[in-house]
Image: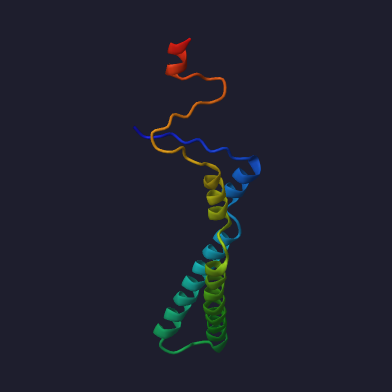
Amino acid sequence: MEEIVIHHISEDELDAIEDGGADSLLLVFGVSLLSIGLGYLSNLLLLDKPQSTTRFTIYLIIMVITLILGPILLLIWWKLPDRRQKMIAKIRRRHTPPPDGTQVVQEGQTTRNEEKAQ
């Protein structure tokens, strides 16, 4: 039979798990900027001859900025510690499982052996 484990979680811990932290935003912005930069790169590579130097310059600036910022944000995301995983590990460490074959009895409860003895 499987065991049901109930973990006690404070409101602060629950809020921290729900928020997810800034690391998820770094991942989203990093991937978005990288894909935008690659899109502009493909446009510039497939462009035959630029009709306007101003438009070409704007495309080039956007491409360079996004291709630089995207990997930087992804690297920052990779190096940041995951607060949510640390919080979950902290909650799990609080639970100490009983040794195999033992019966867990809460305060005020009696076991079957104690009931038979009375």
Q: Nearer the viewer, residue 48 or 21?
A: 21
| Mark count | 0
Q: Quadrant of residue 21?
A: bottom right
Which residue sits furthest top? Answer: 118
Residue 30's spot in the image, x, y percent? 53, 69
Using residue 117 as the reference point, say whether residue 24 is left or right of it.
Answer: right
Residue occupying the point 57% across, 65% down: 26
User: Where is residue 66 shown, x and y percent of the image?
Assistant: 54, 76
- Residue that lies at the very extreme toward the left in this rendered image: 1
* Residue lying furthest right: 12
Q: How is the image coloured?
A: rainbow
> Where residue 22 sits in the image (x, y, percent)?
61, 60
Measuring from the top left, give residue 81's x and y in whole percent. 57, 63
Is 18 drawn above or below residue 110 in the view shown? below
Check the picture and name the quadrant holding the N terminus.
top left
Q: Nearer the viewer, residue 118 or 72?
A: 118
**Residue at (43% x, 34% y) in the render:** 4
- Report the front residue among 89 and 24: 89
**Residue at 36 percent of width and 34 percent of height:** 2
Q: Residue at x 52, y 64 (%)?
A: 27
